[in-house]
Amino acid sequence: MMPIDPEYFWQLAEEEELLFMDGFDDAVIGLAVQFNKPVVLYDRNKCIQNLMDQGLSWENAEEYFSYNCEGAWLGEKTPAMFLQLDEKGVEEVIRKRKENGH
């Protein structure tokens, strides 16, 4: 995988007037594209960790983030969250898709 050039990232961010979530800059991992429109992509686990570093328990951080960040619809430029499968998870998805005829 080739990483996105930071200059290109900022060019798109300015041209497209992308939305950023306050307080989570260290969790930005790139861009996602949906319907040919870029949006800022955040590492969800880093966002939760950021809240925990501010003193919230995992449960409270999860609840706060889920409701106030993931649950906030800000239009077509709403940032996206990244949740990564480990290798076993990827294998499980492939196996189940094959079992279901896909």
Image (cartoon, rainbow, N blue to C red):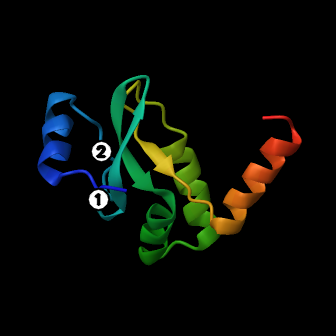
Name the amino acid, label 1. Answer: Asp
For residue 25, side relative to residue 5 (left or right): right
Label number found at residue 20: 2
Whether 40 is drawn above or below 2: the answer is above
* The C terminus lies in quadrant: top right
Across and down, in percent, residue 9 comes to 20, 45
* The N terminus lies in quadrant: bottom left
Per the image, label 1 sits on a secondary structure element best described as helix
Whether 25 is drawn above or below 53: the answer is above
Q: Nearer the viewer, residue 95 or 58?
A: 95
Per the image, label 2 sits on a secondary structure element best described as loop
Residue sitting at x 30%, y 52%? 22
Q: Nearer the viewer, residue 70 or 34?
A: 34
Whether 83 is drawn above or below 99: the answer is below
Across and down, in percent, residue 10 comes to 15, 44
Q: Nearer the viewer, residue 62 or 41?
A: 41
Across and down, in percent, residue 5 comes to 18, 52
For residue 28, side relative to residue 83 (left or right): left
Residue labelled with disc 1: 25
Q: Are the residues flagged by discs 2 and 1 in contact, CB closer than 8 Å?
A: yes
Crowd band around label 1 with a 10 angstrom C-alpha radius: few (<14), some (14–19), many (20+): few
Q: Nearer the viewer, residue 75 or 56?
A: 75
Crowd band around label 2 with a 10 angstrom C-alpha radius: few (<14), some (14–19), many (20+): some
First along the sequence among labels 2 and 1: 2
